[in-house]
Amino acid sequence: MHVTGIIAEYNPFHNGHAYQLCRIREERPNTIIAVAMSGSIVQRGTPAVLDKWQRAELAIAGGCDLVCELPFLFACRSAQDFARGGVRLLMSLGIDALAFGAESDDLGHLRALAAAIDAPETQERTGRLIREGKSYAQALTAALQGLGFARGPELHEANNILAVEYLRALRGTAVTPFLIQRRGAGYHEADLQELASATAIRQALRTKTPDWTALAAAMPPGTLRVLQEAFPGAIPEPDALLRALKLRLLTLSRDDLMAQYGLPAGEGIENRLQEAAGRAKSTGDFLQGVVTSRYAKSRIQRLIPHLLLQTPRALMAAADEKGPCYLRVLACSARGRLLLRRVKCESPLPLITKVGPFLHSRDRLRLPELSLERQMLAFDTFATELRTLTLPELAAPDDFTRSPRFFKP
């Protein structure tokens, strides 16, 4: 049994994703395609445009065989931690290849870049530059330039960055990297076209009257239908969490704030967060008030859900050491069931199709007493509840009631 893994967000599933799956089927026609997908909050720290079950079902309809949730504690992280968490989860499914897209088509160069990042001299120089006040991205770029890597697309294109992190996470494993060069719009391009970026699609949905004709050209019909049904009441609002964020930051003591994940001690970032919270009239205002040359906008954006959910620093450290603690199925094809049967017998991780047997909603009231596995799962459910707060129409969180959809042949 051959299994090809993908680490994805499908936020939402569009023609570029469909192209990637077609390429996998062309090169590996008999493979099972297993996906580690972000849940309710995605890597950039924002609520997913559709809920995780809708996105998983659209992925199966588009050609995937199994979609498992990448736990929130890995999904809403830096590119490095996102990649490590996804690779570790997929390896527990027994993948023999990992497919990923990048702007570059030069796998050898991306591999060399991954090896250079892990070189001791790069790590030492990066750490020194960070201590001098540079952001991680700035410090790493400077360190790599010192090793002869010119500042080209490989150092700042979003999908190249992820590709390099996947290759770093795969080092020392027997998993084969399967690079697929991206076609169409870049990650941050806002123009709608046949191969539009997910960013462009999400921006189009922020208007009162989306151009559904233009959107139809950028995605499979199934995605368009689900988005039209969800709009506008079930599509997250950009500033919906601002009041909750202001309340959280303005009522937490400094010690409580510094016990949370993502806040380095002794750098004064907690003061900037609280000052910005007092002044901000929009999420954009808040970000602008915190961002510095050291703290990039993307880093602060990812920090917001962790501040709201009060992710403990110690819990994140334990999660990083252990890795994903379970395989939570969101959707599965008939072919994916073959993999699930094998996983049930061979994987070291428990298989979760219903949350209830593993975690009761009331268990979350005594979070520190729970095992790491149950705390990790609890934060997945917290993330879902956080997303529901961003919806224009009131909705009940579904983690304790929804089951995965198993597609028939």
Image: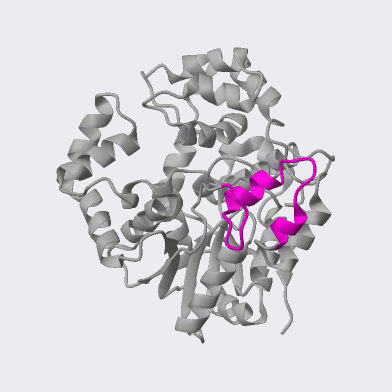
On screen, residue 135 versus residue 328, left or right, reads: left
Q: Is residue 124 above or below residue 172?
A: above
Residue drawn 62% across the image and 15% down it: 251
Residue 177 visible somewhere in the drawing: yes
Q: From the top left corner, tell me how far across and down residue 305 is, in percent.
A: 59, 35
Q: Is residue 5 magenta?
A: no
The residue lying toward the viewer, choosing from 175 and 203, is 203
Residue 350 visible somewhere in the drawing: no
Q: Write the start and end of the magenta stretch as one range.
A: 190-216
Report which quarter residue 170 is drawn in: bottom left
On screen, residue 377 versus residue 296, left or right, reads: right
Residue drawn 80% across the image and 52% down it: 230
The residue lying toward the viewer, choosing from 135 and 395, is 135
Report which quarter residue 354 is drawn in: bottom right
Name the quarter where the C terminus is drawn.
bottom right
Q: From the top left corner, tell me how far across and down residue 255 is, in percent.
A: 49, 17
User: What is the total number of numbered labels drawn onto the structure image?
Assistant: 0
The residue lying toward the viewer, choosing from 53 and 22, is 22
Q: Is residue 275 above or below residue 152?
A: above
